[in-house]
Amino acid sequence: MIKNLQSTTTLHNGVKMPWFGLGVFKVEEGPELVEAVKTAIKEGYRSIDTAAIYKNEQGVGEGIREGLKEAGISREDLFITSKVWNADFGYDSTLEAYQTSLDKLGLEYLDLYLIHWPVKGKYLDTWKALETLYSEGRVKSIGVSNFQIHHLEDVMKDAKFIPMVNQVEYHPRLSQIELLSFCQQHNIQLEAWSPLMQGQLLEDSTLKEIADVHGKSVAQIILRWDLQNGVVTIPKSTKEHRIIENSSIFDFELSATEMEKIAALNENKRIGPDPDTFDF
């Protein structure tokens, strides 16, 4: 049951992952980033998602340390994710990239390490490196990002470990129904990046109508829709009131009819690159 910000889903390796977290894509190093991460932790967030290519791991680490102090909790209470960037793909370079991320974050381990994109011909060796990190106990969970069904099948053919998480672009205009179904069948937790479609959905009339019924914002309706679909969600925000508002979604439930109305908004429309056609 998803009751609050600390509610977790159990990944297929037994690790508990919060349903809700803070994303920091496009948030540059600096006081704003540190403050956002610290505020999120203080307000009850337990999951923070970054990546090597965001070039903000240092600030995220600082925000984590300050947030832990303010909230009076320990590192073990948090779930921290980062990702290996395309330029570091390959077995040895992935192992090095992981250590670099840890050093920048100032952490001894990550809770989740992801392959950022399915770069053709390169992600299988990278997955082997992630399996090594996991086997050695250096990371709690491993997964992928932006993988479509055929990429997942390719990895799973010879994998020692099936990916525990697949983080993809997911919002009402791109509901990825087949991918969600495939992941659920194979106990791979789907996670949404850009759940609010970078703000493009906030004026949608259908969503506004549903929001009015519940006395909630459109953003809150979308994020609730994610959770009721069994999808982990990590909206990005740097403003304290938004960080608090985004997470205030545990006191209402969308009806089956409302869920269907939101699902009907799907247009298979992406704001990010298409993993099948993008030249990495």
Image (cartoon, helix red, strand yellow):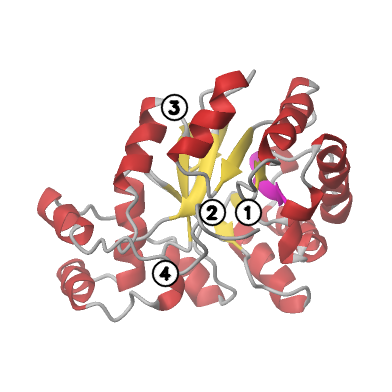
Assess disc 3: are there few (<14), some (14-19) or many (≥20) residues with their C-alpha within 10 Å of its C-alpha: some
Is the residue under label 3 in contact with that under label 4 (CB below 8 Å)? no
Asked whether residue 251 is in view, the answer is: yes
| Residue 112, picture quadrant | top right
Describe the element under mark 3 as helix, strand or loop. loop
Disc 2 to disc 3, C-alpha distance: 20 Å
Disc 2 or disc 3, which is closer to the eye?
3
Disc 4 to disc 2, C-alpha distance: 16 Å
Assess disc 1: are there few (<14), some (14-19) or many (≥20) residues with their C-alpha within 10 Å of its C-alpha: many
Which residue corresponds to mark 2? Answer: 21
* Residue 254 is inside the magenta segment: no
Q: Which mark is residue 215?
A: none
Which residue corresponds to mark 3? Answer: 187
Which residue corresponds to mark 1? Answer: 48
Which residue corresponds to mark 4? Answer: 197
Residue 265: % across, % down? 22, 64
Tell me where the magenta segment starts and ends, as one range. 77-85
Query: Compared with residue 149, is residue 84 higher up or lower down, i.e. above or below?
Result: below
First in sequence: mark 1 vs mark 2: 2
Disc 4 or disc 1, which is closer to the eye?
4
